[in-house]
């Protein structure tokens, strides 16, 4: 798999001329100049952004894909849904696709067909290597063509997935490309904090006075402070005397020394890091609890963390999931439809889940059977022996009417 992070910024025409080309990025969505563009490789050096995209890829790659026909899941899943790329695992295929969508805003599948035109494999292409061309006929109808490695392809050969579609724009818009200013600000803040202690231009203290200094006085005072002669030449004292004098500083003429001392939290810019993490989590739609950051004024409890995960799946992951589902559905034969099984992401803890099963099996108000509940837990239906054993347990736990009357 080629490096999907390389030359991502070059995909977009970040200049005024590009906005004149049909299907290109509108000028109002572009940074001021090409030089200010942050590439995906550069953006991934932000630990928060890297972690957030990794969360998306990990969440999607662990999901299974079911295939339905008329709303009923097929007993035997087609090979295209089980292993879309014959040369990669299903998890790797999904990871490549999700990373392409979040890093570039686009994902491209090259479709390999068999002798009868059937789809036999899908290869995820490096989005930086694919050029989208929009051609309009005399009636104004647009047709998309894709150039990859010098070859022109149509929709039959390449499937185009987009994270965010904009009318009149041929390519999708990704978070890194849309929020260049925020990403660059996070990078600048990170770099400034990292270089604070290693920057030789930053003073370790300040000599100040309320008196007027003559030209050259400031340099002379600084040289004496560091154990040199006023003119900057090295002192000729013997080594023992120099070590003693270098540890003693004598101030005069109203001079005051103020050391520049910072608390560890200030040196590491912890508040800025906190804000950057929240900002990047918001940008890519990653849950704050998984990013190990607490939003101010929002207490984290089990209940709202669970709701956060439900919101994450519905309003965060659902967009790339739908893109993949729709693209696979178009390639499956007949009326088959691909659908992700997101139960693994929405499953609650064991105790809560079993309590919910108990309500669904309640003899008076229940709505499910034992085999249906077992199916939700990915267990096979009960055997006759198991049914007999469960029935025996119920008789022991539930006294008969005669026994209740006798006890009364």
Image: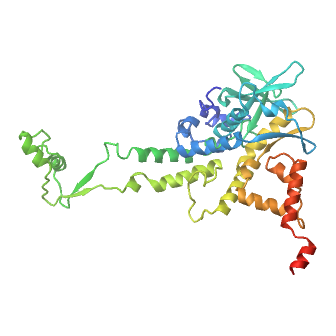
- Left/right placement of residue 257 relative to residue 38 reads left
- Which colour scheme appears in the figure? rainbow
In the rendered image, residue 249, in percent from the top left (x then y), is placed at: 14, 53
Which residue ends up furthest to the front in the rendered image?
406
Q: Nearer the viewer, residue 306 or 317?
A: 306
In the rendered image, residue 87, in percent from the top left (x then y), is placed at: 72, 24
Residue displayed at 87% across by 59% down = 392
In the rendered image, residue 210, in percent from the top left (x then y), is placed at: 20, 61
State the quadrant of the N terminus.
top right
Q: Is residue 330 above or below residue 317?
A: above
Q: Quadrant of residue 55?
A: top right
Q: Nearer the viewer, residue 169 or 44?
A: 44
State the quadrant of the C terminus.
bottom right
Please say whether residue 47 is visible from this viewpoint: yes
Residue displayed at 63% across by 26% down = 2
In the rendered image, residue 176, in percent from the top left (x then y), is placed at: 61, 42
Residue displayed at 79% across by 50% down = 377
Q: Is residue 344 above or below residue 93?
A: below
Residue displayed at 38% across by 54% down = 264
Q: Quadrant of residue 16?
A: top right
Q: Is residue 354 above or below residue 169?
A: below
Please say whether residue 141 is visible from this viewpoint: no
Which residue ends up furthest to the bottom in the rendered image?
408
- Left/right placement of residue 391 relative to residue 218 reads right
Looking at the rendered structure, the number of numbered marks drawn on it comes to: 0
- Left/right placement of residue 387 relative to residue 254 reads right
């Amino acid at each position: 798999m080629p490096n999907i992070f390389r030359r991502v910024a070059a995909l977009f025409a970040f200049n005024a001329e590009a906005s004149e080309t049909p299907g290109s990025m509108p000028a109002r969505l572009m940074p001021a100049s090409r030089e200010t563009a942050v590439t995906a490789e550069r953006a991934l050096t932000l630990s928060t952004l890297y972690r957030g995209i990794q969360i998306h890829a990990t969440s999607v790659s662990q999901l299974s894909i079911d295939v339905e026909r008329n709303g009923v899941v097929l007993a035997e899943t087609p090979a295209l849904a089980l292993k879309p790329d014959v040369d990669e695992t299903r998890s790797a295929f999904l990871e490549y696709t999700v990373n392409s969508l979040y890093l570039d805003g686009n994902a491209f599948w090259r479709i390999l067909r068999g002798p009868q035109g059937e789809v036999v494999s899908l290869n995820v292409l490096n989005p930086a290597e694919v050029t989208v061309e929009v051609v309009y006929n005399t009636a104004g109808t647009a047709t998309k063509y894709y150039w990859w490695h010098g070859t022109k392809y149509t929709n039959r050969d390449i499937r185009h997935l987009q994270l965010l579609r904009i009318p009149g724009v041929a390519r999708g818009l990704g978070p890194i490309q849309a929020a260049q200013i925020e990403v660059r600000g996070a990078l600048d803040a990170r770099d400034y904090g990292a270089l604070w202690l290693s920057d030789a231009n930053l003073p370790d203290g300040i000599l100040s006075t309320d008196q007027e200094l003559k030209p050259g006085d400031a340099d002379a005072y600084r040289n004496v402070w560091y154990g040199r002669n006023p003119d900057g030449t090295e002192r000729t004292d013997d080594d023992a005397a120099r070590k003693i004098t270098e540890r003693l500083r004598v101030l005069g003429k109203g001079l005051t020394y103020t050391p520049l001392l910072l608390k560890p939290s200030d040196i590491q810019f912890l508040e800025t890091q906190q804000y950057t993490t929240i900002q990047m989590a918001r940008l890519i739609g990653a849950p704050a609890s998984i990013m190990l950051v607490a939003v101010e004024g929002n207490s984290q409890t089990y209940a709202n963390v669970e709701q956060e995960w439900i919101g994450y799946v519905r309003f965060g992951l659902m967009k790339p999931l739908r893109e993949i589902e729709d693209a696979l559905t178009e390639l499956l034969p007949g009326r088959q439809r691909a659908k992700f099984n997101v139960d693994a992401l929405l499953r609650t803890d064991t105790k809560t889940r079993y309590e919910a099963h108990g309500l669904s099996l309640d003899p008076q108000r229940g709505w499910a059977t034992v085999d249906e509940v077992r199916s939700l837990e990915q267990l096979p239906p009960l055997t006759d022996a198991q049914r007999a054993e469960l029935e025996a347990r119920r008789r022991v736990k539930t006294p008969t009417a005669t026994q209740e009357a006798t006890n009364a």
